[in-house]
Each structure stands twice: as C-alpha cells, then as structure tokens.
Amino acid sequence: MASLLFAFLHLLALALVVRLTLPPRAVPANPYALACDTLLGRLLRAVRPALPLPDKLLCVVLLALDLSACAALLTKLGGPELPLGGFAVATYPARGFLGWLGLEALRFAGFYLAILTGGLLLRLWHLGRALPGYTGDLLRLAGNPFTRLPLGWQAAGVAALSLAYVGVALLFADKVEYPVAALMAELSRSLPGAASFAPGLFDFSSYAAPLRVILLAGLTVVDVIGNLSYYVFLLLLMLLLATLLGSRPMAFFLNDAVRLLTGPIPPLRLGPLDFAPVVALFALSLIETALGVLLLALMRGVAGVV
C-alpha cells in the first residue's frame, strides 16, 4: 500500500514539474498528456481559493507539499532503503523531518533520472529518431525541457546527473550494502574459470570512492535497460489480457507502448502474432549484457584487479 501511495505522489510531483516547464496556458496535443493536464488543472482550481497564487508559484508550493507528504510517510515507515543501480542498497539514519524531506527529494530525483535515462536510451534504441506514437510523445513531454536538447547533450546530462545522484546518495548514507555483488561473488566460485576472479573483484567497498561512484552510476543506466526489457514482457501480458477482455482503448495504448519499446525492429507477423517484441527482448538483453561486461572490464582494469 505504501509503495502505491509513493508511486502516486511521485507521479503527481512529475506532473507538477512538467507543468512548471511548459509555457503558461499551454494545452498538450497528446491525449494522454491532455488527460493528466486536465486533472492537474482541476486540482489547481480546487486549492486556489485557499492559496491565491499565480499558476507557477502554486505548482512550486504543491510540489513542496507533495514531497513533504512523502517525507511524513517515511517517518512512519522508520526509514527507507535507496537502491543504487540495482547493485547497492543505501540506508539512512533518522535525522528529523527536514532530513526525511531532503532524502525524499533525493528519491524523487532518482525517479526523475530514471525517466530521463529511459527516454535517452529509447532515443538511442530508435537510432536517434524522435520517439514514435502518443506514448513516445508523452515520454518526451515528461522529460521536458531536457528532451529538447541534442542527443549528445542529453547523454552528457544523463551521465552528469547519474554521477551526482549516486555521489550524493553515498555521501549521506549511514550504511551501504552490496547484496547482488555478494551473490555474484558466491556464484563465481562455482562457475568454470572462477579462479580468474580475484576475491576483491565484487567488493565495491574496497574501491576508491570516485571509482565506486562511476561504477554505480554506470550500473544505474544498465539497470534502466533491464527495466525496459521487463516492461516489454509486462506490456505483452497486459496487451493479451486487454485483447481477451475486448478493451479497445487499453489495447490501443498498450500497442502504442509496445511499438515504442520494440524500437527499430519492424513487425514480424506470423498470422495474428507479432514476434517483434520477442526479438526486442533478446536484443535488449544482449545490450544489457554487453554493457555489464564493459563495466566488469572497468572493474578489473581501472581498479587493478587481475
């Protein structure tokens, strides 16, 4: 229940951030974005009698209240764990409400960074072309104004933001654990050629702090690629369910999203079945593995592990 509440509050915060980046009285042409903008407009009109502020300033106040609500929820939960790149788990001590508010701002920054990273990776997956369909346009709008930058500047921005996010997260963490790394180290001992793995290869805590930040920032990007593969699989299941239930609007949306995630792979139909998403899953898995191997080489080379 808490996870669903956090997801709703983060989506509301994202809608407020997007509203702040748009020109005044801008009306999105995208039907999905228009529906979100309409709901947000009703919220602004509902609170304006109590907070008679200009539109932009009211969005800033609501954003602060939204993050404050998340911080208040954190105080009830007794403290969160912040995953970093799917490899590290950082925990934070109780530091009062302002401390939780700062941590919540960091958690939302990670959520926003994942959206920016996903948008950039999809642009690269589509060979630099604009993302297709209403879903692609919605993702571009969610990353506005970042997504308006040239592709090279977007890549530099994602790299800089990933380094900053991981660096700040590690700086204020009370404790950092690497459960996946420990699991990989355990598995490596039972695999062929395990002798080639030095004992400290997966011990992130033994690396210098700058190298640790760089590795975890890279793993954050790799983690987003893994999530894209997961979303293709999940959307296919939802599309099958929507088709069986005869829900045409939902099926249209899911088809649009699947087409976005399959990237440049053309439809590969055999009767009523399209195997392009299956090929996309395989291709994304290969890309994720290749990037993981490059990061492993960096761990072995730069860290001096032979």
Image (tube, helix red, strand yellow):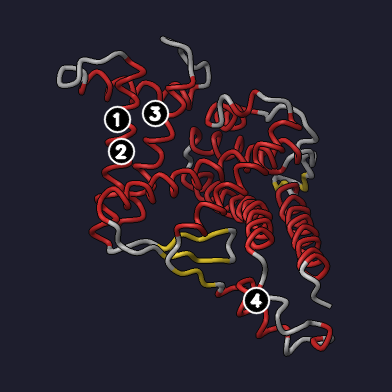
Residue at numbered disc 2:
66
Apparent side of residue 49 relative to residue 117 in the rendered image (left or right): left
Callout in the foreground (3, 4): 4
For marks 3 and 4, give the CA distance: 40 Å
Q: Earlier in the sequence, mark 3 or mark 2?
A: 3
Callout in the foreground (1, 4): 4
Q: Residue at x 54, y 35 (%)?
A: 253
Q: Do the residues bearing badges 3 and 2 touch, measured as CB atoms within 8 Å?
A: yes
* Res 130 quadrant in image: top right
Q: Amino acid at mark 1?
A: Leu
Q: How many marks?
A: 4
Q: Residues within 10 Å of mark 4 (few under 14, many from 20)?
A: few
Q: Residue furthest top?
A: 25
Q: Earlier in the sequence, mark 3 or mark 4?
A: 3
Q: Do the residues bearing badges 2 and 1 touch, measured as CB atoms within 8 Å?
A: yes
Residue at numbered disc 4:
203
Q: Earlier in the sequence, mark 1 or mark 4?
A: 1
Q: Nearer the viewer, residue 25 or 97?
A: 97
Q: Position of residue 13 (x, y in %)?
A: 38, 35
Residue at numbered disc 3:
16
Q: Do the residues bearing badges 1 and 3 touch, measured as CB atoms within 8 Å?
A: yes
Q: Residue at x 64, y 71 (%)?
A: 204
Q: Amino acid at mark 4?
A: Asp
Q: Amino acid at mark 2?
A: Asp
For marks 2 and 1, give the CA distance: 6 Å
For marks 2 and 4, give the CA distance: 38 Å
Residue at numbered disc 1:
62
